[in-house]
Image (cartoon, rainbow, N blue to C red):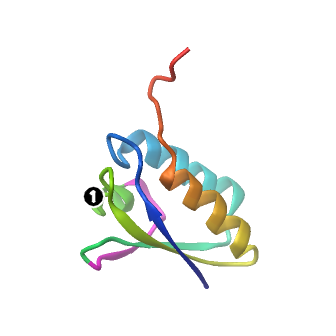
Amino acid sequence: MQERYVTIKNKAGIHCRPSGVILAAIKNEFPDHLFEIVNPAGVCLEINNMLALLTLELTCGTRAKLRVEGIDEALAIKKIGDLLEFEFDFPPKK
């Protein structure tokens, strides 16, 4: 299992739209991996649905621990960690 600390940079935090992008990456690219996030309050949840991500209350500036277990942990933790730290823009600016 690999661990990485991430800091949420999205101004609105991890809400429904970013959660959808993150979950799609997990399901499409790393379906056989286990992903968990531990928020600052110590709540640890498996990232397997949108409600789990929303429950963690990952607001802008929150520092959380991401844990990944699976065949390609290094790639998985980099990709999903980067998505958690990404500043999403909905709708995108042109």
Q: Residue furthest top?
A: 94
Q: Residue at x 75, y 73 (%)?
A: 72
The amino acid type of the residue labelled 1 equals: Glu
The percent position of residue 65, horizontal first and vertical second, equals: 44, 73
Q: Is residue 70 above or below residue 63?
A: below
Q: Residue at x 48, y 64 (%)?
A: 48
- Give the residue number, with chain letter if any, for mark 1: 57
Q: Secondary structure at mark 1?
A: loop
Instruction: Classify residue 54 by image quadrant.
Output: bottom left
Q: Is residue 47 magenta?
A: yes
The percent position of residue 78, horizontal first and vertical second, equals: 65, 63
Location of the C terminus by quadrant is top right
- The reply to whether residue 31 is in sight is no
Q: Is residue 92 left or right of residue 11?
A: right
Question: How many dots with numbers?
Answer: 1
Q: Is residue 92 left or right of residue 25?
A: left
Q: Nearer the viewer, residue 46 or 90?
A: 90
Q: Is residue 30 left or right of residue 16?
A: right
Q: Is residue 18 above or below residue 69?
A: above
Segment colored magenta: 42-50
Q: Is residue 79 above or below residue 45?
A: above
- The reply to whether residue 39 is in sight is yes
